[in-house]
Image (cartoon, coloured by chain):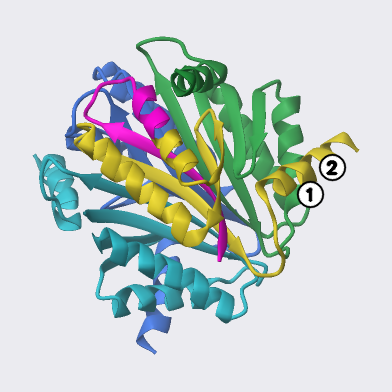
Chain colours: A blue, B green, C yellow, D cyan
Amino acid sequence: MKVIADVCIIPIGIGVSVSREVTACERVFWEAGLKTRLHAYGTNVEGEWDEVFAAVKRCHELLHEMGVPRISTSMRFGTRVDRDQTMEEKIRSVEQKLQS
Amino acid sequence: MKVIADVCIIPIGIGVSVSREVTACERVFWEAGLKTRLHAYGTNVEGEWDEVFAAVKRCHELLHEMGVPRISTSMRFGTRVDRDQTMEEKIRSVEQKLQS
Amino acid sequence: MKVIADVCIIPIGIGVSVSREVTACERVFWEAGLKTRLHAYGTNVEGEWDEVFAAVKRCHELLHEMGVPRISTSMRFGTRVDRDQTMEEKIRSVEQKLQS
Amino acid sequence: MKVIADVCIIPIGIGVSVSREVTACERVFWEAGLKTRLHAYGTNVEGEWDEVFAAVKRCHELLHEMGVPRISTSMRFGTRVDRDQTMEEKIRSVEQKLQS
């Protein structure tokens, strides 16, 4: 089952700056071979369900290993069985309508 | 790794009423032996990471088997290594402060 | 326009414990006269759109006044025009199906 | 108070395809003069608090006028008082660390 997801991981208890931890998670998604695209409030991730969620678990484990005491993640994820769809197609479908 | 989560599963493409599908997911969490508590915009779930996410995957699979073509889930989940915490403790800690 | 919402406000940069801030926001919703129900990962809020969002804004303002440097909130909210629905009805509709 | 937000609006009860409605909301953000950037699971929006939330309300009103009976939106939004920050800076701060 393929999933398109959006992940926003918030480290708590390490101060206001969290870009070091966000960067570490971005590397986890890359190393997992997942398609990923960073935006200003999270990261899009696309792949097989088990691989996507294994990477998210690895992010939590890694941040705790890095000394983060508490993590709160908000995530959206979608599956569909009516047809295949990629992240690029989702964006293109809206951009084409915007230009017409 | 223990996780406290909040899950809101939205079936798309089956009309405005989704309570049959929400009920089916609630049963999935129960059958998985997870602590769960329904609220007006989702369900709190507490348990071991792998069990919680296996149940969420089972919800997506089950709803697709029931004929739902597309699903969009929004989920929050938290882990912490500084101390153990249950769903009841999180609520009690706020309720005690509210009463004082 | 009536809205049923679920709000999870995360103060960042003040350490791991956030129950004092969550409590302060709960009071904001009460004082605004909104129907509210705390759960383990946020709070359900029901009311007129403008009143609900004014209260959420007041929460951010209040926490910053209390010294929180950074806040990240995740929120779900739903509106419908096909019929009226309350938080209690949403929960009851699932609980009835669970028992049958 | 400035806010950086991420908005994912899900029309319910109109079938599996929702790109027409997502496009209409994208236009609402543009017409409101807000900085916006579409991604595969929502849209980043940056601006003054009241303008951002007025635009989100306008999206719900517009979709209902277009015939959508039910809408469920998930939104993240952040404010900070320790310093100014733009969407571009948030992304750049992670991308620089990724490249080093």
Kind of residue at badge 1 = Arg
Between the C-alphas of marks 1 and 2, the distance is 7 Å
The picture places residue A42, in percent across and down from the top left corner, at 32, 47
Q: Is residue B38 above or below residue C49?
A: above
Q: Is residue B87 magenta?
A: no
Residue for badge 1: B20
Q: Nearer the viewer, residue A43 or C56?
A: C56
Mark in front: 1 vs 2 = 2
Q: Is residue C66 above or below residue C35?
A: above
Residue for badge 2: C97
Residue A4 appears in the picture as rendered: no
Is the C terminus of chain B in the top left, top right, bottom left or bottom right quadrant? top left
Q: Image quarter for residue B69?
A: bottom right
The picture places residue A60, in percent across and down from the top left corner, at 37, 26
Q: Residue at x 56, y 57 (%)?
A: C3
Q: Secondary structure at mark 1?
A: helix
Compared across the picture, whether A100 is left or right of B3 comes to: left
Chain where mark 2 sits? C
Please identify the residue farthest to the top as the structure is shown.
B83
Chain where mark 1 sits? B
Q: Residue at x 31, y 80 (%)?
A: D31
Q: Is residue B23 above or below residue D3?
A: above
Kind of residue at badge 2 = Lys
**10 Å crowding of disc 2: few (<14), some (14-19), many (20+):** few
Q: Secondary structure at mark 2?
A: helix
Q: Which residues are magenta?
A: C1-24
The picture places residue C62, in percent across and down from the top left corner, at 28, 39
Q: Are marks 1 and 2 in contact (CB under 8 Å)?
A: yes
